[in-house]
Image: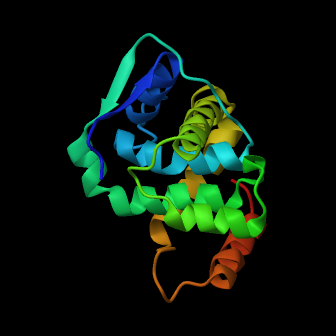
Amino acid sequence: MFDNDYVLRGRHAEFADKLVSESTKGVAVFKRLVDLLYIAPIVGLLFDRDAVVESGTEKRIFAAVLNKESESLLFAFRLVLLLDQKLGLDDQDRTRQAFSYSLSTEGLLSARIESRVRGGIEVLHEHLCEGDARKRDLLDNLVQYLEVVDITSPTSTVEDLLAECRKVSRAPSM
């Protein structure tokens, strides 16, 4: 699986540090760096944000931690590959690439995922560390909701999740 640590560099390392430390408005948004690595490529995809590798400060996720969380990471990475139309592949080829993807894959796909990871970290930092209180409240509520709902459960369906999201979106604001 993972032979090496995953290293974030430059401002992405600094942003990641803010997202996992309690210096972010007195609250840690993520408990661990690996949790950020799990969600960041999905956020990068949703916001269509890519970012290049930088040099500078380093933030490391150890290979042992990555291996322990490899199933969740693989799920997130495959999801990004399935949905990322900027790969220039048709649906069938994206599906083939996603399900042949392994955590040891090198080349374009891993570079694409890493670009989405960095882009997602930028988006999360902008919205959670620099954004206004209303945006932070909305995202806090979403995070709390997702902690309650087990979307990996085989009994949870997409329709169930959408129905719950609709309920939350119609709830009166505080």
Which residue is pictured at 60% across the width and 84% down the height? 157
- Placement of 84 over or under 118, stated as above or below: below
Give residue 49's quadrant in the image. top right
Give residue 93's quadrant in the image. bottom right
**Position in image of residue 83 (x %, y %):** 70, 60
- Placement of 52 over or under 145, stated as above or below: above
Tell me if 42 is positioned left or right of 65 in this view. Answer: right
Which residue is pictured at 59% across the width and 41% down the height? 108
Which residue is pictured at 38% across the width and 50% down the height? 104
Give residue 117's quadrant in the image. top right
Q: Is residue 16 something one can see in this rendering?
A: yes
**Position in image of residue 122 (x %, y %):** 61, 30
**Position in image of residue 128 (x %, y %):** 59, 35
In-front residue for pair 83/1 = 1
Q: How is the image coloured?
A: rainbow
In-front residue for pair 17/167 = 17
For the view shown, which residue lies furthest in the left direction? 64
For the view shown, which residue lies furthest in the bottom direction? 155
Tell me if 165 is positioned left or right of 114 in this view. Answer: right
Q: Is residue 144 something one can see in this rendering?
A: no
**Position in image of residue 145 (x %, y %):** 54, 64
Count of labels shown? 0
Which residue is pictured at 52% across the width and 17% down the height? 11
- Placement of 117 over or under 129, stated as above or below: below
In-front residue for pair 128/25 = 128
Tell me if 129 is positioned left or right of 86 in this view. Answer: left
